[in-house]
Amino acid sequence: MATANKTLVIVESPSKAKTIGKYLGSRYKVVASVGHVRDLPKSKIGIDIENDFEPQYIPIRGKGDLIKELKKEAKKASKVYLATDPDREGEAISWHLAYLLGIDPEEPCRIVFNEITKNTIKEAIKKPRKIDIGLVDAQQARRVLDRLVGYQISPILWRKVRKGLSAGRVQSAALKIICDREKEIQSFVPEEYWNISAEFKKGKTFSAKLTEYKKKTIKIRNEEESNKILAELEKGSFVVGAITEKERTRNPFAPFTTSSMQQEASTKLNFNTKKTMMVAQQLYEGVEIKGQGTVGLITYLRTDSVRISEDAKAAAKVYITEKYGKEYLGNHVFSNKKKDIQDAHEAIRPSIIELAPDDIKDSLTNDQYKLYRLIWCRFIASQMAGAVFNNMQVDIENGDYTFRATGSKLLFDGYQKVYKSNTEEDKDKLLPPIEEGEKLVLKSMSGEQNFTQPPSRFTEAGLVKKLEEDNIGRPSTYAPIVSTLSERKYVKREKKSLVPTELGFIVTGLMEEYFKEIVDVGFTASMEDQLDDVEMKHREWKSIVRDFYVPFSKDLEIADKAIEKVEIEPQLTGETCEICGKPMVLKVGRFGEFIACSGYPECKNTKPIVKKIDVACPKCGRDIVARKSKRGRLFYGCSGYPECDQSFWNRPVNKKCPKCGNLLVEKKSRTGDYACSNQECNYKE
């Protein structure tokens, strides 16, 4: 008896295909498209501007064999379902797949799911729908606009400033935000001010700060004023005035959106946005859990929504009641700040509430555990009762002057049992028993000089927050924006801060002068709203591109003629060329920075930038340094090369393998953070 043809399910990634294949069983074949299969060509703009901005899609280079295989599988399948990610990008990939495989997009060929669990996948396969052209067009509009901006401004920057530069619809607006903040810092003039504080003895010592004079906020501008006030205060006595006590409830945070997850992972885990998204993708697509097989641990990672499904709320309610008690149950309603573009997606939450982070820690890498724990705790906390504090405020009078002391005590921990904010205001700060009219014993009193501080530089988390507040870009674009700004050398990292380079200022200056709208925050935000209208209100996407392109094309003409060649002074390294004796300078090439002779092209001497890592070469004792290969890959080798050829792909550490004596290298895995550099030795720790 002939076996029936299988149903073909196409997803984006091989790991997701593996997970879903296990859930669906033998009647289905699950394969991966490995991301996009068709796109605009890399070698040219790929948009027919004369033909109403028609995109000229082509199969992606290197995917010919994969497309052939997909066509072959689709031909013999009884049915084809397109199960790419549940967002604009995923919808567009499904639309391109439908085109290549000859599937009618009006047919129910598309299945979507917000989490990769057995029940969700089996339910999704029962409810196929047609491809959502609104989502596809929203993605096309963004893609075409980004291509028009990037492929037409970037060549001007290449010719006028330096090869390898780029501009972008969202990237350039983000760079201007960073540059504007740096200008604020540079032009900031600090102002002097003074604080007066006093310490009192009442069983224990507690402090109070001078806040008012004649019931109005006091501002002390200099030392002279401070000393004058101190002299007056020393003549008087300190008497307790009004005492105010009230309970304050601090409610939990909403569960994560993509943006808030990136911000919190940066603050609490020190993950950059790119790493956060990479690890979250692994958790979403599925991890092998001991005794349970492959499990998708979190819901979809690209979302603007804080909405939670009723099933997830019910599961959290059961878990919280059993684990902590009924009094810990909350009933909070979270709403989105802006219109909910992708409300079909829930907030980011654990797919299976019962899989507590510590219960599955052995199955996760260190990074996976950290991020999963953050997501799990944030979600559970969001469904718990608020933390209750008793706040106490004491006014202490001395003539016309009022000092203020504050105290607080945690009465009920609520959600903080699982998710602490680590802010000072949430810590107990107890005042001694005190009564109105009571005269206090002054222990000490002093004035302290201060200066107003400039605004702080943006960290990655701060920039993501700013982009979200200003409605620039979308969650999926935040990680690549920061990466691109770093790769183009427009910004550099100093500790956690993003600092614009001279090149970043030059490019932003040119963009401000010749492409005002591209870097204007208001215009960029307005454009995002228009692009959202394609998805939400089915606005015709080409009309947005037309309206944008008419003034933009005029700006391009003017810029190309008006911008003069910019000469950037090379940065001296302090070294001298050993071949011709001229100064060596810092240069930027295809694979990053390197040192070159300033006498180029007469002298072509170049050297890599090497960074010591404080590890001695096990062969010769010289320093091991970080280098880059000809293809730009980072590796670690002996500074004595070519005399000594010792090298490592993973970063070595000052620790020897207890089994064979070779150096250990950093190599994170489920079984540890370090491994032996000797490939024949399997030691890990």
Image (cartoon, rainbow, N blue to C red):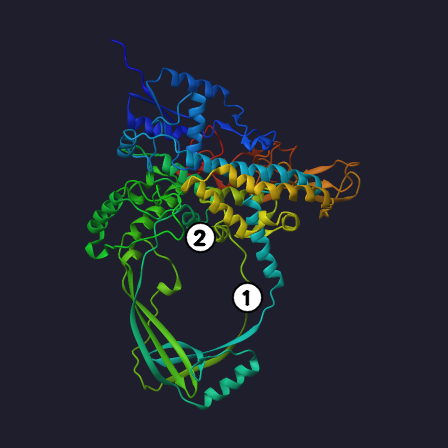
Q: Residue at x 52, y 23 (%)?
A: 62
Which structural element holds mark 2?
Answer: helix
x and y percentages locating residue 612 in the rendered image? 59, 44
x and y percentages locating residue 20 in the rendered image? 33, 29
From mark 2 to mark 1, how far is it between C-alphas?
Answer: 22 Å
Q: Residue at x 35, y 83 (%)?
A: 241
* Res. 635 image quadrant: top right
- Give the vertical position of 299 relative to 326 (above or below): above
Give the mark nearest the N terminus, 2 or 1.
2
Residue furthest to the bottom in view is 235
Q: Amino acid at mark 2?
A: Thr
Q: Is 512 positioned to the left or the right of 366 in the image?
A: right
Which structural element holds mark 1?
Answer: loop
Label 1: few (<14), some or many (≥20) within 10 Å? few
Q: Is residue 257 visible?
A: yes
The residue tagged 2 is 267
Q: Is residue 272 visible?
A: no
The residue tagged 1 is 453
Which is in the foreground here, disc 2 or disc 1?
1
Q: Is 293 positioned to the left or the right of 229 in the image?
A: left
* Res. 296 image quadrant: top left
> In which quadrant will I find the N terminus?
top left
Q: Amino acid at mark 1?
A: Gln
Q: Is 591 positioned to the left or the right of 423 in the image?
A: right
